[in-house]
Structures are given as C-alpha cells and as structure tokens.
Amino acid sequence: MDYTIKLSQYERMLAQYIEQRDERALYKGQKFSRKMLEQHVSPEDVVSMHIEVVKRIIPHVDQKVMDSLEFLLEVMIGYGFAYREHQSLRTRQEQLDAEIDIAANIQKSLVEGEIPSGHGVDIGVISKPAKKMSGDYYHFVQDDHSISVAIADVVGKGIPAAMCMSMIKYAMDSLPDYRKQPGDVLSSLNHVVEQNIDPSMFITMFYGVYHADENIFSFASAGHEPGFFYNHKYDRFEELVAKGSVLGLRRHSNYAEYRLDIEPGDMIILLSDGVTECRTEKGFLERGEIADIIRSEMHSPAQRIVDQVYYNLEMLQDFVLRDDFTLIVLKF
C-alpha cells in the first residue's frame, strides 16, 4: 500500500468520524492501525499523515491546534526511535533466552544420571538452579563393592558457573580407577581447575566413597559446605567436617582423608550452600534448624526426605530460590 492510498483511506475515515462520531469509524481506525503496524509504518509517520489530512479536511483549523499537532509529531519522532531500539533489544533478548534454554536443557541432560540403588543404601537427590543454569553439580559411581558420591558448587551463578560445572563433569568422567581415594580425586581435580578456570572463580567439592564390604565411608573436602552425619546409635546429628582448600586456589594442594564407621540407621547428608544460606524474614536459618527439618522426615524414604526439605525451605523463602540448591541423603 503506497503513501497516497494510505493517505486517502485515512482521510475518509477521519472525515467520517468527525461528521458522525460513531463506533464504526473508530473500528475502521483500529483496523487501519494494525495494517500500519504490519507494514512497519512508524508512529511519527502516522502522526504526520494525521496532520496532513487535518489541513485538507479542516482548512481553517485553529493555529494553536496545529501547533500542538506539530509538537506531538516531534514527540513521536523521539518515541519512534526509542521504540524501535526497544524492539531490537527485545528481539535480541528473546534470541538469547532461547539459546540459554537450549544450553540449560543440554546441561540438565549432562548432569542427570542414574542414582545408585544397591549395597543397602537408600539415596535421595534434589538439585534446583536459582537461574536457568546451575553452578551445582553432583555425581555418583557404583561398582560391585562401593558407591562414590561427589557434590560441588561453583562460586557464582548463571552461565559462567554452569560452564565451570560442565568442565568438572568431564574431568570427573575421565578420572582413572583410583577414584576410590577421595583425597587423590580432589588433588587431581584441583590440578585441572587451576589450569582451566579464571583466577576469580573457584569451586568447592566434597567427595566420598561408601565401602560396602567394610561399612566404611571415606571422604575428603575441598572447602565445601560441611554436611551432616546422623548417628543412629546416639540419635544425634554431627557435622561432617573435613579440611581442605577450594579447587583452583593453589596449584599443589593435598587433601586429608577422613573415615566413618557406618551402622544400620545412620545417614549421610550432603548439601550445597544454597541449602544452608536459606534466608527468611528473621535472617539466615541456623544449621541446627535444617537438621531439625531433616529429623522431622527422617523415617521417610530418602527421596521424600530431600523433596520435603526443599519444599519446606522454599516455603520459608516465599518460594524465591536465591542460590542453586542441591541436597543428597544417603540412608544406611
């Protein structure tokens, strides 16, 4: 539709409305505006068209009215530039969101694996990202005699943290058979991280192995959030503390290995700091309060425990997840 035809149509519609002031003329105007939008006619061009038509059908229009229309035209010129820039940014944002959605789905497929179900251990896992992509990571390996478990947390959130997490995943997959020595595993990963990530970023990790034949849980930590050990015999929760520097901080780091004797009824609880840094109106939850929530569900299957803990903590935060959240429960 060329400008002359558009101008003629607009003139007829405006004249009809001025003479009759009926709803039908307004409806035609609305349809006309949609056509202008489809043909990418700018707002300032529509106002300019209106001014030209007003001069033609109302030749003796008051000069103040014309001045106001000229002012409106200048306003709409600025508005048009801003609107087109906004639309361009919106389109780019939609494209970026679509790419992030694809990356998040790829990440999810990389991280999610089969949860072990043997050696008399009931395992529950829940992992929720604060944003579309997560900086938390967990990993299981099961063989005829043991179950290995890892939980890691990249400091930060979003895409940079997710990229570091993916690197850790591939480093874990390439570990040799000595993965059953937690301290050696962390030393090996520390070397990979120190060489491959930005100095401003670092990763915490806990790595443990349950040796089913000996009923021993050996573990080491690279600065990770301490978990909990529920001692069934004494009916108490103890902190699962292990000393060790975060991955990537120093080129050569040694990690001490710790051991626990496991008895029926005991539990190992591993978590990321998104669990312990739960914020409510009263401030951060104490670790003891988290242990109390776990205790209230401890007679349930492991998966129900983690699901209920997540729901309770999410509810306390008004269902706003402020950090990546990962919780693992091993019931023996």
Image: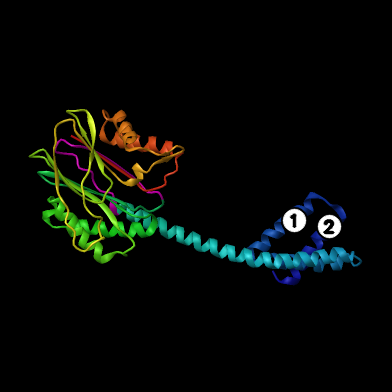
Figure quadrant of the C terminus: top left
At a point 19% along the width and 28% down the height, the residue shown is: 234
Q: Is residue 225 above or below residue 185?
A: above
Examine the rendering and report whether any part of residue 155 can be seen. yes
Quadrant of the drawing holding the N terminus: bottom right
> Residue visible at 12% across and 44% down?
146
Q: Which residue is mark 2?
A: 16
Q: Amino acid at mark 2?
A: Gln
Would you name the residue on which mark 1 appears? 28
Q: Secondary structure at mark 2?
A: helix
The percent position of residue 131, horizontal first and vertical second, equals 41, 51
Location of residue 190 in the rendering, given as x and y in whole percent from the top left corner: 21, 59
Q: Residue 273 appears at what percent x and percent y?
A: 33, 46
In the orientation shown, which residue stands out farthest toward the right?
A: 60
Residue 174 appears in view:
no
Tell which circle, 1 or 2, labels the residue nearer the N-terminal end: 2
Residue 316 falls in which quadrant of the image?
A: top left
Check disc 1 and give the amino acid type.
Answer: Lys
Comparing 60 with 270, the one in front is 270
Of residue 166 and residue 245, the one placed in the foreground of this image is 245
Q: Quick check: is 154 in the magenta stretch?
A: no
**Count of labels in the image:** 2
What numbered label is drawn on residue 253? none
User: Residue drawn at (39%, 41%), measured in percent from left and top?
Assistant: 278
In front: 276, or 123?
A: 276
Are the residues at dot 1 and dot 2 in contact (C-beta closer than 8 Å)? Answer: yes
Range of magenta residues: 110-130
State left or right for residue 167 relative to residue 10.
left
Report, in whole angstroms, how far the alpha carbon at label 1 lies from the one at label 2: 10 Å
Residue found at x 75% / y 57%: 29
Residue 82 versus residue 165 in the image, above or below: below
Image coordinates for residue 48, horizontal then vertical, percent: 76, 68
